Amino acid sequence: MTITELPLTTAPATGRSSFDRLAGLPVAVIGAGPIGLAAAAQLLERGLDVVVFESGASAGAAVQSWGHTRLFSPWDVLVDEAAARLLDTAGWDAPAAKRLPYGRDLVADYLVPLSETPELATRIRYDSRVTAVSRQGMDRTRSNNRASAPFLLRVHGANGTTEQLARAVIDASGTYSTPNGLLSSGLQPAAAAEVAENITHALPDVLGTDRSQFAGKHTLVVGAGHSAANTLLKLAQLADETPGTTITWAVRSVSPVRVFGSENDELAARGQLGTAVHDLVRAGKVALVDRFEIDDVRPAANGRVEVVGRRRREAASIEADVVVNATGFRPNLDILREMRLSLDEIVEAPTQLASLIDPNLHSCGTVYPHGVDELAHPEPNFYIAGMKSYGRAPTFLLLTGYEQVRSIADELAGNKEAARIVQLVLPETGVCSTALPTSDGTLPVAAAREGDSCGTPAAAAATGSCCS
């Protein structure tokens, strides 16, 4: 095993106190998605060297996996400002501001060109999966001189395992590779291996490469977010084209009001997405099963599976050929076992941020401006940013992540006052309820206030960042 120290190729910033003792080492960014590359651009703009580790073969690899899905946000809210300045110097032809791109467009027209700019191209390590983050010579129990010890990242790549030293770490690795459990308990089916071929990840390419898996089959979509909505619309189109294709949609809430949306949604495409799904349910093209708690998935006859559980306190089951797990995502915290983290025990987001985004408390998806203070951990100069910073909360938008890493970059550059001037204006959903049932299965009195403004800027109640 080798330890690699990348050379510092930009002028160091000043005023960084103990941070100066690590001069000569880069800031390590985990993930070359939208937030990771934005972090790198923000850091470079402040004179801090950076190295980016991407587990995929190219920038935006996770986004590319759902590239067939159209985003409901237009281009003008999908591009980080520092990233745009880097691209402009490279002669970038910016997409039309109000056009709605597919995920593949976000990769091809933004992330790949950004990764190929002269400033970033030599700093990104592809096919490099970070498997652990620690401090050099220090596990999480050792405190003396901890802040002045460099971070140590263990990285697995094509040439084996290496270790990289860094002065700070920003984990922007996202959550797409770690979906929530399909069962209401949060677990995977007891016979997971036996039913694995019948269960798919969120946002399968129903009309493209995965078409044969769904055509002429009965599909059960599980989840009450916009990932589920996108899949339902694609399945409905497939049903129109292929006889025998049927669709059931299971949610554990009283009503999928978050998906159905509101005419007050400031992102028109998001509102239209909800309206289209609502129309499918009303027309009988999608069978909606509400208040369904899934306990297990078992093998059934003819290669199908039986999804068993409870509905309105009564035993219930649904038999299907394919089950789409669109129940959201969770952070992979295994690589951070040696980091001193302060995480909320419910949402698994940074403690100071969790109260702002906890879906049990914020039915509107209300998000207040937040930055380095809310993202800080007991581990000095370590930050989780982007979708991963939201833990299991489903309300993340790219604009939120861009402001997060802007604030972090200012903090690491010693611009502490600027780091705490956090401004974030997000489009309203126009929907103020997750419509979760009470213990007796009824709709809470204070829920389902469609059309409320919620009083503050709100983020989308989407499941995952893929539709942000």
Image: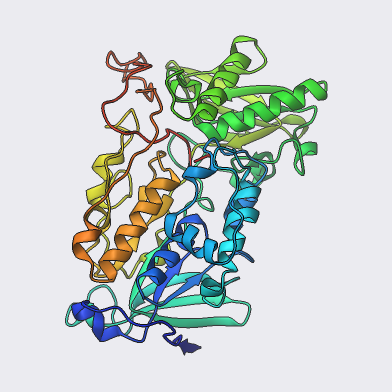
**Residue at coordinates 51% horizontally, 83% vertically from top-left?**
162
Report the front residue among 385 and 297.
385
Image location of residue 29, percent across then percent down: 43, 68
Q: How is the image coloured?
A: rainbow
Image location of residue 135, percent across then percent down: 32, 78
Relative to 468, residue 46 above or below: below
**Residue at coordinates 66% horizontally, 25% vertically from top-left?**
319
Does residue 50 show up? yes
Q: Would you identify the image quadrant in which residue 14 lies?
A: bottom left
Image location of residue 199, percent across then percent down: 64, 40
Q: Would you identify the image quadrant in which residue 394 lies?
A: top left
| Residue 119 relative to residue 356: left or right | right
| Residue 334 relative to residue 268: left or right | left
Q: Would you identify the image quadrant in which residue 321 lies?
A: top right
Image location of residue 198, percent across then percent down: 68, 39
Report the front residue among 59 and 238.
59
**Residue at coordinates 32% horizontally, 18% vertically from top-left?**
447
